[in-house]
Image (cartoon, rainbow, N blue to C red):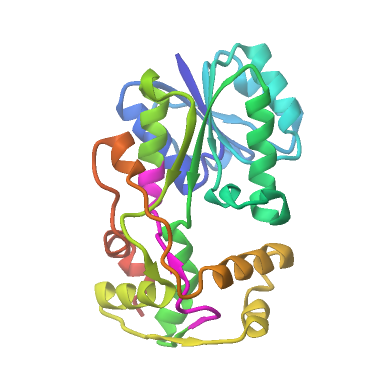
Amino acid sequence: MTTLVTGSRGRIGSALVTLLHHEGRSVRAASRRPQELAPPDGVPAVACDLGDPATFAPALEGADSVFLYAEPSHITEFVTAAERAGVEHIVLLSSSSVLAPDPTANPVAALHHTVEQALIRSSLTTTLLRPGAFAGNARQWSAAFRAGRPVELPYPDSGISPIDEADIAASALAVLTDPRLRGGAHHLTGPASMTVAEQVEVIGRVCGNPVGSRPVTREAWLDSVASFIPADIAVALLDHLATTDGRPDDVTGTVQELTGRPARTFADWAADQADAFRP
């Protein structure tokens, strides 16, 4: 039994490859650029570009399960190739944004919703992992911390329950290796809700480099991220922050239910990443 892990250059995919390998499971690390992968010894790296259907069949050959990133452009072709290859189970890295009343109205939610629906309509057993905001999103503030500048926040009081990417990988391991957990949808969060400004405070305290934060306008924030976040995605992120401004985020116990241990705190994550936030 072999699991194909797409997106193995990412933090979740690479962590999952290592977890599966340590469990003694047969795993195949896949990426658009497999030559850039560094999987554990004995784990093959293969080409699988979710934007190029020609790569699907070779990557899927002999796999019975897949960890899939949400890329809607050729999801119909991917599903067909997986069914032909004899894949039995797909675990999709989706997003809690699909839980909105109209997921098609938000570009982030819409792309995940499209992939979810294609998998649900297929003959494949599908498990949906729907994490909220990643703790790792806070890395966008590392330059400000290193320079000793306050972090600029458009909605500092927006509630968020950041989840450590390591917990997403551990949850994926659980649903891939325990047949009792196959199928269904799982909303994954960190163990507590906090404001975005409180995230900045936690990083400063844990890393010994308290720079604080200051509010900025939507327009100023959009200008600051224009070089690395597409405009429609940036606006969608802002709109989400606006809807949660002054409100606590949802918190679930799903990580513990799936893995048998509590979700890691944001302070745990910050301690692991401390060097990125120090001068």
Between 90 and 257, the one nearer to me in the picture: 257
Q: Please state the horizontal and vertical placement of residue 26, each as a whole percent of the image.
A: 42, 20
How many numbered tags mark residues here?
Answer: 0
Question: What span is in magenta?
Answer: 152-168
The residue under the point 66% across, 77% down is 222
**What is the x, y in percent for residue 218?**
64, 81
Residue 171, quarter of the rendered image: top left
Camera-nearest residue between 251 and 38: 251
Question: For residue 266: magenta?
Answer: no
**Residue 153: in magenta span:** yes
Q: Name the spot of residue 86 as percent of width and height, x first.
A: 60, 11
- Report whether residue 51 is seen: yes
| Residue 71 visible in rendering | no
Name the residue at 65% across, 54% down. Answer: 108
Residue at the image position 66 percent from the left and 50 percent from the top: 103
Q: Quadrant of the C terminus?
A: bottom left
Q: Does 167 sit left or right of 30 as displayed?
A: left
Quarter-of-image position of residue 47: top right
Nearer-the-camera pick, 227 or 257: 257
Quadrant where the N terminus sits is: top left
Is residue 86 placed above or below 229 in the rendered structure? above
The residue nearer to you, when weighing 199 against 3, is 199
**Residue at coordinates 48% horizontally, 40% vertically from top-left?**
13
